[in-house]
Structures are given as structure tokens and as C-alpha cells.
């Protein structure tokens, strides 16, 4: 047994190393950096012709670590001008970071003019920079102009934007900011410390396993050893409980387990018709977006509802046979996990139908699935504990879960949430789990490291709270069953 325990510890360490290395390389560059483009304002008016000796200055806040190009919305007055513009990027004290020429002879009227810098310009995110435009030969009849504005077009209406730094034509400030967008790259600082973090967690894991081996050698029983022993002894019972729950769900059903496929598809079809025709959703790849939310929510709803009655529903068995009580809510969660696995099949079918690009990033899906399982299990343990002492919990949870569903971005875009409420809105753990699901499936890239960290915290904290509450109350269950 000693050698077997040692072998298990070695396997755990090896699996941890393999998964850590595989995750880093599968996540790829999108895990370490991201390209972004700032949004351009809607045009309201023009600055007027830019003549020789005049300077057009626009201050802006750097939102990325390097700047690759700048795009300006300009006009040629429907003529061919013969001038050379100098587009410069200045730092906060007026020092020139980069300068590039733009010939006006080849520019189109009322179009976006892109100025690409020879090399990415390194800046400090959050610093105030200045975009300066001058011309070499601008005279009346041979000069261009630029658009400025103070609103953003959302597709349905214009949203006003307060001009923090108005554009200046020489020393005169205009009522708005230049219609410009900046393209660049942001580097994630957390990704730079990935291997330090992995090594630290690996050392803690190795120390824990060594401590476990030492305790076993001394004959001491730790909580970890007790849980491992329980799952080893009651493995057959756990399997039977899962099978029983799965069969009970589809008992006397004509289609049986095929409802795991049909249920999310039919629900998606109904909601898709409603939100793509009546409410005109503008979400890209809405069918995948919607089905992803439905699959995740169905698992959470089913797992928590089944865990809710896992103790009270097995009262006769608990009173007669000793089995670790956490086995009952755990088996219900595993049973729901089986249904989730089956529900992923129609999700991938929809991915194929919508011609969504399959990438290696799909291999990262076990991470949000694990987080979803831990979060649902944690909530299930809390509900199962409360249900023993307060039987009205089942009715209250029906109301709370309905409210929770509407507070989760299942069929609507999070952009409709007011900015001042987003901090509170993001306290919903399902928001972070769904976001990783959708970025992996729809965008085909890895989210930023912060997304993984927030998802981990949002799922593990409720799980640990659920374990603590269940452990503190389980000894009193028999008094209320």
C-alpha cells in the first residue's frame, strides 16, 4: 500500500507538469498578448483645411503597450491634392516617439486613412500621448481636412461621449475629438509570471503530497487520506447512485437519454426565433452564443436542484447504512455532469452547421467545465445543508434560480448592462465561466490570464464555502430527517 500511495503521488506530479506545459502552449500567443483597436467616434464636423504652418493636435490615453498604426477619418474635398502630411506620436512631455509621412495624392475622399509606423512604438499603458499632424505644402485649394465628433454609433442610436481632450487646430480647441482609432498590442503581465506561478503551485503540491506520505507512514489519518479512502471504498456505491439518478430522470420516457440532445436544441430554437426576429439580436454567431449559455445554465440548474434534495431524498438510506453524506450531493453532480457531456454533442453540431472554425483552443474547454462543476457542487452542498433544516428552501430556490438566470448573459449581450453596474454584475460566477466558454468556442482564441484567474476564484471560493457548511452541519442531519 505504501508503494501504491507513492506511485499515486508521482502520477499526480507528472500529470500536473504535463497539463501545465500543455496549457501554456495550447493557449498560444492570445494567452500572452492581444491586438486591439480603439473605437472611432462618429463624424460631426471637419476641422477645416490644414495649411502649411498649422498643426493639428489630439491628446489621447494609451490603452495598449505598443502602438502599430493610427487611422484617421479625413476628406480631400473631392479633389486630388498634392501634399505630404507628417503624422507624429509624442509622449507626455512633447518628445517625439515616432514620425511617418502620408502622401495626400493617393487618398480617397471621406475615407479612413491608415498610418502604419515602421516598428511598434513602445508606450506605457495609461499615459497621455499626443498625435500631431502637420503638412508640407498645404494651401487653399491644395489641402485636406479631418473629421471630429463627440458621439459613438451603437448601431441603433448615437451615444454622447464627453471630450476629455478636445482636438486643437493650432491653439484653438474644437468641440470634440478627432475621429481616429489606434491599433496596437497589449501584453498580459500575469502571463509573464506564468511559470513562476506554476512552480510555486507545484512546490506546494509536492509539499502536500510529501506531508501526506509522512502522515500515512506515521499512521495518522488526514482529511485528504480519508476522502481518498472513502472514494476507494464506496466507488461501487457512487457508480450505482449515478446510474440510478440517470435512469430515474428518463424513466418511462420514450426518447430517454436523447432528451439530453433535444432539450438544449429545442430551447435554443425557441429563443433563437424570439431574439433573432422579434428583438433583433446583433450578437455575432448568435446560435452558438445562445446554445453555450443554455448548456451551461441547464447543468447548473439541474445540478443544484438535484443536490437540493440529495440528503432529504435519501433519508431512509442515511438512517440505516453509514455512507459519507457528501457522497449523495456529489453523485447528483456527477450525474448532471454526464448530461452536460451529452449536451456538448449538439453544441458541436451547431458549431459545424454555423461553420465555426475549430481550433486547438477547444482542448482548453475542460477548464471552464471543471470550474462550472466545482461551482455547482459548492452551491449544491450549501442548498442540501439548508434544505435539511428549512424545507421551504426548494420553493425559494425556484424563485432565486429564475432571477439568477436573467442576471446571467445567456441570451443577451453584456454590453446592455450600464457601466456603473458592471462591477456588481461581474460578481456572478457564471459570467466568468460563460465568458471563457464563448471566447474559446466562438473566437477560437484563449482568454487573457486574468479571465482564468477570476473564473478559478469564482468557482473555488463557493466550493470551499459549500464544503465548510456541509461539514459543519452534517452531524445534525439525522436529527431533522
Image: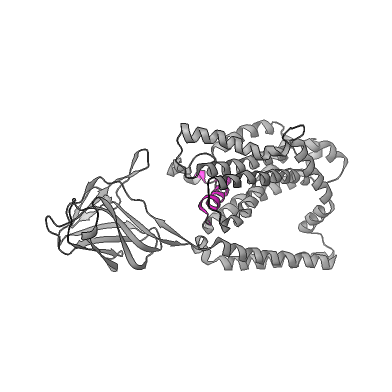
Magenta part mainly helix, strand or loop?
Answer: helix
- State the residue in front, 177 or 105: 105
Residue 162 percent coordinates (x, y): 31, 46
Question: Is residue 217 shown to the viewer in this render?
Answer: no
Is 176 left, or right, of 320 in this rendering?
A: left
Q: Give percent across and percent down for residue 475.
A: 79, 44
Q: How many marks?
A: 0
Name the one closer to the observer, 290 or 392: 290
- Asked if residue 218 is positioned above or below residue 375 in the image, the reply reads below
Q: Position of residue 457 (x, y in %)?
A: 59, 53
Q: Quadrant of residue 480?
A: top right
**Residue 448 seen in the current view:** yes
Whether the magenta-drawn stretch holds residue 439 is answered as: yes
Residue at the spot 77% in from the left edge and 31% down from the top edge: 252
Highlighted range, magenta: 424-446
Image height of 248 relative to 36, above or below:
above
Left or right, residue 99 beside residue 372: left
> Which quadrant is home to the C terminus?
top right
Residue 175 in the figure: left or right of residue 339: left
Residue at coordinates 30% horizontally, 63% vertically from top-left? Answer: 92
Residue 381 in the image: above or below residue 229 = above
Amino acid at each position: 500500500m505504501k508503494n501504491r500511495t507513492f506511485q499515486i503521488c508521482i502520477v499526480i506530479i507528472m500529470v500536473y507538469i504535463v497539463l501545465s506545459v500543455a496549457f501554456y502552449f495550447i493557449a498560444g500567443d492570445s494567452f500572452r498578448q492581444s491586438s486591439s483597436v480603439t473605437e472611432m467616434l462618429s463624424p460631426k464636423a471637419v476641422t477645416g483645411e490644414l495649411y502649411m504652418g498649422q498643426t493639428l493636435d489630439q491628446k489621447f490615453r494609451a490603452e495598449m503597450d505598443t502602438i502599430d498604426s493610427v487611422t484617421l477619418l479625413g476628406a480631400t474635398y473631392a479633389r486630388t491634392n498634392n501634399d505630404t502630411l507628417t503624422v507624429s506620436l509624442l509622449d507626455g512631455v512633447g518628445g517625439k516617439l515616432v514620425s511617418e509621412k502620408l502622401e495626400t495624392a493617393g487618398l480617397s475622399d471621406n475615407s479612413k486613412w491608415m498610418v502604419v509606423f515602421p516598428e511598434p512604438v513602445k508606450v506605457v499603458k495609461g499615459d497621455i500621448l499626443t498625435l500631431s499632424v502637420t503638412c508640407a505644402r498645404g494651401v487653399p485649394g491644395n489641402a485636406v481636412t479631418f473629421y471630429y465628433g463627440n458621439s459613438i454609433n451603437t448601431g441603433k442610436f448615437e451615444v454622447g461621449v464627453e471630450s476629455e481632450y478636445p482636438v486643437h487646430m493650432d491653439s484653438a480647441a474644437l468641440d470634440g475629438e478627432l475621429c481616429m482609432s489606434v491599433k496596437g498590442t497589449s501584453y498580459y503581465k500575469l502571463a509573464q509570471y506564468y511559470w513562476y506561478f506554476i512552480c510555486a503551485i507545484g512546490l506546494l503540491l509536492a509539499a502536500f503530497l510529501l506531508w501526506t506520505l509522512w502522515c500515512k507512514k506515521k499512521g495518522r489519518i488526514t482529511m485528504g487520506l480519508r476522502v481518498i479512502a472513502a472514494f476507494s471504498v464506496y466507488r461501487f456505491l457512487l457508480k450505482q447512485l449515478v446510474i440510478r439518478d440517470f435512469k430515474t430522470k428518463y424513466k418511462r420516457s420514450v426518447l430517454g437519454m436523447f432528451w439530453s440532445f433535444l432539450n438544449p436544441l429545442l430551447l435554443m430554437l425557441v429563443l433563437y426565433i424570439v431574439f433573432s426576429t422579434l428583438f433583433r439580436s446583433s450578437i455575432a454567431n448568435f446560435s452558438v452564443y445562445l446554445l453555450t449559455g443554455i448548456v451551461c445554465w441547464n447543468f447548473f440548474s439541474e445540478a443544484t436542484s438535484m443536490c437540493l434534495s440529495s440528503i432529504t431524498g435519501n433519508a431512509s438510506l442515511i438512517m440505516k447504512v453509514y455512507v459519507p453524506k457528501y457522497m449523495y450531493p456529489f453523485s447528483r453532480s456527477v450525474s448532471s455532469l454526464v448530461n452536460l457531456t451529452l449536451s456538448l454533442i449538439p453544441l458541436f453540431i451547431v458549431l459545424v452547421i454555423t461553420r465555426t472554425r475549430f481550433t486547438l483552443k477547444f482542448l482548453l474547454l475542460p477548464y471552464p467545465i471543471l470550474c462550472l462543476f466545482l461551482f455547482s457542487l459548492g452551491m449544491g452542498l450549501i442548498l442540501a445543508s439548508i434544505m435539511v433544516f428549512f424545507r421551504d428552501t426548494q420553493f425559494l430556490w425556484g424563485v432565486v434560480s429564475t432571477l439568477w438566470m436573467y442576471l446571467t448573459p445567456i441570451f443577451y449581450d453584456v454590453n446592455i448592462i450600464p457601466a456603473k453596474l458592471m462591477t456588481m454584475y461581474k460578481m456572478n460566477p457564471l459570467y466568468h465561466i460563460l465568458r471563457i466558454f464563448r471566447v474559446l468556442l466562438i473566437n477560437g482564441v484563449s482568454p487573457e490570464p486574468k479571465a482564468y484567474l477570476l473564473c478559478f476564484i469564482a468557482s473555488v471560493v463557493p466550493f470551499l464555502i459549500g464544503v465548510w457548511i456541509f461539514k459543519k452541519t452534517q452531524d445534525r442531519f439525522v436529527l431533522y430527517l
